[in-house]
Image (cartoon, helix red, strand yellow):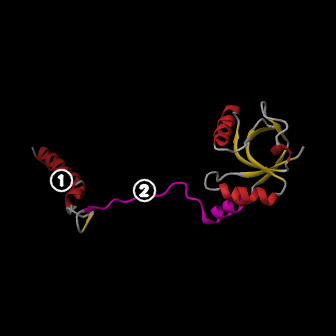
Amino acid sequence: MKNRITVYLSILFISILTLSACSSSKNTTKISGANKIAGGTQITMPEPPRNIQPQVEQQSQSATKEEITRSESFYLSEGENPESDSFTKHYHVVVGSFKSRDNAKGLQNSLNAEGNNAIIVINENGMYRVILASFDEYLQARATINNIAGRFPDAWVLVNTN
């Protein structure tokens, strides 16, 4: 009988310890309206920003975007006018580059519907470049890029190496 009482007391003691260890949530107090400021506006914490780039890297990216010029060999895409005045110039303003001819053609059509004379060229790697305008002078091409930067922020100058 004494052993049974000892066992019951031991179980009771262990139960009390276990329950008291789980009672930490009972000691917390919730304050209604703690997430509100005067006037009843709910305070929400913004999500932390994702893909944060270091400031130095952002500056170097903008510096390289300012002077993007690429030299490559290219030729007129099928269906383009070989006598086009644009193709005879040295500096070309590229506003789109595509793997698909259909995508390049879509951009060309929308540009030409606006009164431009865009042409499509294809480089040795099979990339279709949509050229908005071509110039004899580099500074003219750069000025055009500055003028269209709002609509085509990734525009760049292409120089034909043929």
Q: Nearer the viewer, residue 20 or 81?
A: 81
In the figure, is residue 102 to the left or right of 140?
A: left
Give the spatial CA distance, label 1 vs label 2: 42 Å
The amino acid type found where label 1 is placed reads: Ile
> Where residue 85 appears, x then y in whole percent?
83, 44
User: Which contiguous range is marked in magenta?
Assistant: 41-64
Query: Vertically, is 6 above or below 76?
Result: below
Q: Quadrant of residue 153?
A: bottom right
Residue at the extreme right = 162
The amino acid type found where label 2 is placed reads: Glu
Q: Earlier in the sequence, mark 1 or mark 2?
A: 1
In the figure, is residue 77 to the left or right of 46?
A: right
Name the residue: 85% across, 38% down. 83
Residue 27 is one of the magenta-drawn residues: no
| Circle 2 Cα neighbour tier, 10 Å, few/some/many (<14 / 14–19 / ≥20) | few
Q: Nearer the viewer, residue 28 or 105?
A: 105
Residue carrying label 1: 16
> Where residue 77 appears, x then y in whole percent?
78, 34
Q: Quadrant of the N terminus?
A: top left
| Circle 1 Cα neighbour tier, 10 Å, few/some/many (<14 / 14–19 / ≥20) | few
State the SS at label 2.
loop
Residue carrying label 2: 47
> Where residue 107 appears, x then y in whole percent?
65, 39
Name the residue: 67% across, 61% down. 62
> Where residue 161 appears, x then y in whole percent?
88, 46
Query: Vertically, is 90 above or below 28?
Result: above
| Dot label at residue 40 | none
Name the residue: 84% across, 54% down. 136
Q: Quadrant of residue 113?
A: top right
Q: Nearer the viewer, residue 162 or 113?
A: 113
In the figure, is residue 96 to the left or right of 44?
A: right
Q: Quadrant of the C terminus?
A: top right
